[in-house]
Image: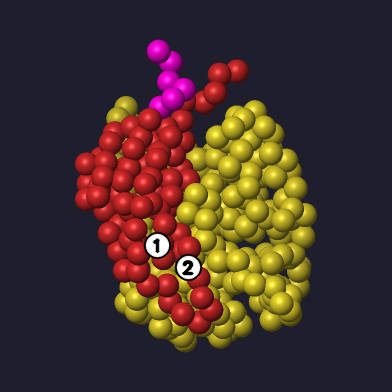
Chain colours: A yellow, B red
């Protein structure tokens, strides 16, 4: 179990996995703004990077490299106790379970892509983020994102939608809004996703925790076609010239399963991270 | 310890007024250095990308800038300047 499950999982539901604990989908977990408090629009500071409370840490890297590294270390040590937004990579099979248990499920525009690449997503064919829970009924409160709202989906539509983004090569990531309130299943890629970027480029872990799985390759089935190589957003897969097969660095693997869904020979499988002693503590 | 050799990206916001509508540098940068933010935020209203000054361009990931100058080439209003003040001589 990862440290989010230790804090927010319930052994009665989904083997203790925090995203399958119904309490983390309850509207009571949804952070309500204090009366009189104005919504701070993410992106109102164009020089700021993504992530609640992470942007302040990120700004120190321009002044003092050592101080920045110290702050990142402290932030990672705080884990669930910290003021940081929790995000975790999940394979599509788990994303299916999440859209089945959460209500409502809606397609919406991705805030990261707006900021990093000015991608305007104006309708349900362009939306790329999945929003979950009561927050979806309040879309008109997100001022800069007022683009005609969100597109509500049934669980089956949501699954089709996740498959569509999986085929395109997007990583599914659980996103929380206040504690472990499951507020979304993002479809992310590097470098546009702020959370993936914070982790891969700067080592800030809380916003993009590795999944409970890790990809493993069966060398007897792999023929080195290389289709999976281009799918990896985390730089964990390469073509190994010596063996003429694909090589997955399991230490770098985030367990998103994008390589698994693309492999035409079913040579890649997802194994439980905890079953591997060397990866048990690598989140 | 020497100051890190990060690029300083100077964006002239009097020239660059509608970055969300233009988005040329945002999409051209190989390192995805740039970011666009809404300065004008009103409740219940979409910020207009074509309104001058409603959105502003920033370079929060300028520590990843290589100095390839592609953004300067694509900028139609000549608003971007890149320097490396801490580069070793």
Give whichever of A48, A225 is nearer the camera.
A48
> Could you say which disc has been placed on residue B40 in the image?
2
> Label for residue A20?
none
Mark 1 chain: B
Q: What residue appears at the point 69 percent right and 73 percent down from the top-left corner?
A: A37
Q: Are marks 2 and 1 on the same chain?
A: yes
- Dot 2 falls on a residue whose secondary structure is loop
> What is the crowding at mark 1: few (fewer than 14 residues within 10 Å), some, or many (at least 20)?
some
Tell me residue A31's x, y (percent).
70, 73
- Where in the figure is residue A178, as x and y percent of width and height? 69, 67
The residue tagged 1 is B53
* Quadrant in which the C terminus of chain B appears: top left
Q: Earlier in the sequence, mark 2 or mark 1?
A: 2
Using the rendered image of the protein, determine whether residue A244 is visible from the camera's viewpoint: no
Q: Name the dominant secondary structure of the magenta segment.
A: loop
- Which percent across, then down, holds residue A281? 68, 43
From the viewer's perspective, tell me whether residue A176 is left or right of residue A28.
left
Please tell me which residue lies in front, A67 or A270: A67
- Asked whether B85 falls inside the magenta stretch, the response is yes
Is residue B72 rendered magenta in the image?
no
Check contact, mark 2 vs mark 1: CB within 8 A: yes
- Residue A164 in the image, given as x and y percentages of width and height: 35, 70
3D distance between C-alphas at marks 2 and 1: 8 Å
Q: Is residue B42 above or below residue A248?
A: below
Quick check: B45 left or right of A262? right
Residue at horizontal 42 percent and vertical 57 percent from the top? B56
Q: Write the start and end of the magenta stretch as one range.
A: B84-89
| Above or below, comparing residue A258 to residue A92 in the picture | above
Q: Secondary structure at mark 1?
A: loop
């Amino acid at each position: 179990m990862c440290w989010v499950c230790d804090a927010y999982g319930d052994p009665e539901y989904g083997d203790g996995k925090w995203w399958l604990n119904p309490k983390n989908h309850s509207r009571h977990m949804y952070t309500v703004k204090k009366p009189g408090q104005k919504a701070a629009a993410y992106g109102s500071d164009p020089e700021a990077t993504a992530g609640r409370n992470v942007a302040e840490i990120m700004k120190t890297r321009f002044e003092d490299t050592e101080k920045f590294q110290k702050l990142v270390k402290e932030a990672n040590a705080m884990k669930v106790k910290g003021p940081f937004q929790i995000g975790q990579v999940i394979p599509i099979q788990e994303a299916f379970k999440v859209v089945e248990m959460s209500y409502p499920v809606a397609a919406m525009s991705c805030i990261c892509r707006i900021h990093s690449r000015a991608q305007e997503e104006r309708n349900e064919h362009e939306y790329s983020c999945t929003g979950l829970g009561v927050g979806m009924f309040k879309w008109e409160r997100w001022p800069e994102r007022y683009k005609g709202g969100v597109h509500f989906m049934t669980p089956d539509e949501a699954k089709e939608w996740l498959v569509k983004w999986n085929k395109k090569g997007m990583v599914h990531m659980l996103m929380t809004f206040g504690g472990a309130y499951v507020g979304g299943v993002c479809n992310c890629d590097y470098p546009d996703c702020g959370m993936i970027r914070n982790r891969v480029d700067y080592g800030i872990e809380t916003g993009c925790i590795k999944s409970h799985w890790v990809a493993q390759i069966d060398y007897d089935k792999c023929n080195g076609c290389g289709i999976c190589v281009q799918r990896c957003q985390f730089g964990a897969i390469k073509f190994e010239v010596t063996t003429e097969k694909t090589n997955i660095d399991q230490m770098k693997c985030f367990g998103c399963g994008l390589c698994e869904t693309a492999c035409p020979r079913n040579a890649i499988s997802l194994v439980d991270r905890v079953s591997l002693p060397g990866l048990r503590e690598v989140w | 310890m020497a100051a890190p050799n990060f690029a300083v990206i100077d964006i002239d916001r009097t020239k660059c007024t509608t970055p969300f509508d233009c988005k040329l540098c945002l999409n051209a940068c190989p390192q995805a250095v740039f970011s666009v933010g809404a300065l004008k935020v009103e409740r219940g209203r979409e910020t207009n990308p074509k309104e001058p000054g409603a959105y502003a361009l920033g370079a929060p990931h300028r520590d990843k800038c290589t100095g390839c100058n592609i953004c300067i080439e694509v900028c139609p209003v000549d608003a971007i300047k890149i320097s490396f003040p801490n580069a070793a001589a």
